[in-house]
Image (cartoon, rainbow, N blue to C red):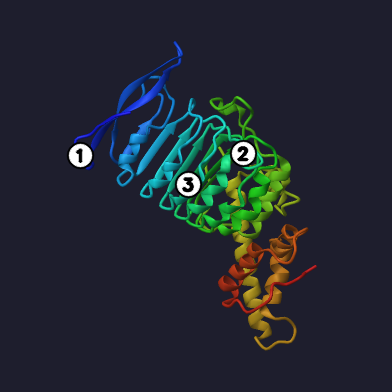
Amino acid sequence: MSTTVDSVDSAMMELRVRVVDTDAQTQHEQVVSVHAHHAELTNEKLGGRKLLVLPEDLRLLKNDLRTLVVQGSQLTALPEWLGEFERLEHLQLISFEDLALPSAISALTGLKTFILDSCSMLQTPATVDGGISVIGAFTQLTKLNVSFCDLKSVPACIETLTSLRKMKLWVLDDGVLQKLAPLLPKLRLLEDLSLNRFSPGSQYLMAELQPVERKEMLALGRSLKAWPPPLLHFSRGSDILFWRGWQALGLPEEAAASQWDDETVLEHWRVQQHKVIVFASGHHARLGSASNVMLLHDLFALIADQVLGCFSLIREWNQGREGTDASAIENWQYWQVRHLGSTDQEMPASTD
């Protein structure tokens, strides 16, 4: 395979790529021009033809490329050398079948945007969900979009993506979003969240999107009620519909009667959290810091658990595990730093 390029620093370069004509099912080579910083290898860019293999000559741009968009409906795999593009900031993969993300892309630590759209993920004992857990290495990621992909689970490493501002998860299977609930408290910078379920074959039929299942709605609601991210808003098209569980989530009856949207519910929880902080701080001031009646961290634990469900939820997440989960400890430390000013108190074992 040859490449025509005037210089490595050239703004544009030509790649010879191998494609298949979907009408005649014939294979041939085609020349496509790409920018040194932005390369799109999609059916549209290829004149309706489909890419058969990612051209190795693309590696000439490994020190320059910032954005790569690949539509891989005929690709069988992504090459390991994709991990060489250490300056890549935006990666979008579209319409892959049995996609397995190569472990080498964990080297793409500078990624800021990662998009998976309409991909079926390879499911083997060694490669669960196409190896999507590799995203845990993308610590600078600010936007994560996984839409119309048949994920069986949400990788726990999402909680390490603490720079995330936008996250969109539109999944197929029941229970996937429920596994996201314990991970949300760590994403304190999250501004834009879109969660939804879709029916098989509905990639282009927005009417086929469905509200999340009740058990998922309750799990997400309890997590967001306990630790509502301060900047979070729900994107248009996100249908969690928390009002359906108004009693279980401690919402006022008005939430069900007026069918509050998710944004209104989230703001209600923020107000509740603020009230807990104000009340507990004021009550402690009246008791006095040397009072034997109740220490400040005990008071926070009692009120926060009754109103927000914080520590009961941590204990529930830890059921069946040995000891106390690291995330639970960090959540408790977050509360101490923000509201108590220190981390020298033990996490309360129970406030029942």
Residue 71 spot, x, y in % from top left: 44, 30
- Left or right side of 17 for 150: right
Q: Residues within 10 Å of mark 2 (few under 14, many from 20)?
A: many
Whole-number angstrom distance, CA of label 2 to CA of label 1: 42 Å
Mark 3: amino acid: Ala
Q: Front-most of 135 and 170? A: 135
Mark 2: amino acid: Leu
Residue 29 spot, x, y in % from top left: 35, 21
Displayed quadrant of residue 98: top right
Residue 93 spot, x, y in % from top left: 47, 36
Residue beneath the point at 70% across and 52% down: 251
Label 3 or label 2, whichever comes before in sequence order:
3
Q: Can residue 191 be seen from the camera position used here?
A: yes
Residue sitting at the far bottom: 290
Q: Check the image and report above or below for 297 versus 175.
A: below
Q: Front-most of 28 and 274? A: 28
Residue sitting at the far front: 1
Q: Front-most of 63 and 162? A: 63
Q: Disc number at residue 104?
A: 3
Q: Do the residues labelled 2 and 1 touch (CB within 8 Å)?
A: no
Q: Check the image and report above or below for 3 versus 178.
A: above
Per the image, label 3 sits on a secondary structure element best described as helix
Q: Name the residue under label 2.
A: 151
Which quadrant is the N terminus positioned in?
top left
Per the image, label 1 sits on a secondary structure element best described as loop
Q: Name the residue under label 1.
A: 7
Whole-number angstrom distance, CA of label 3 to CA of label 2: 21 Å
- Mark 3 or 2, closer to the camera: 3
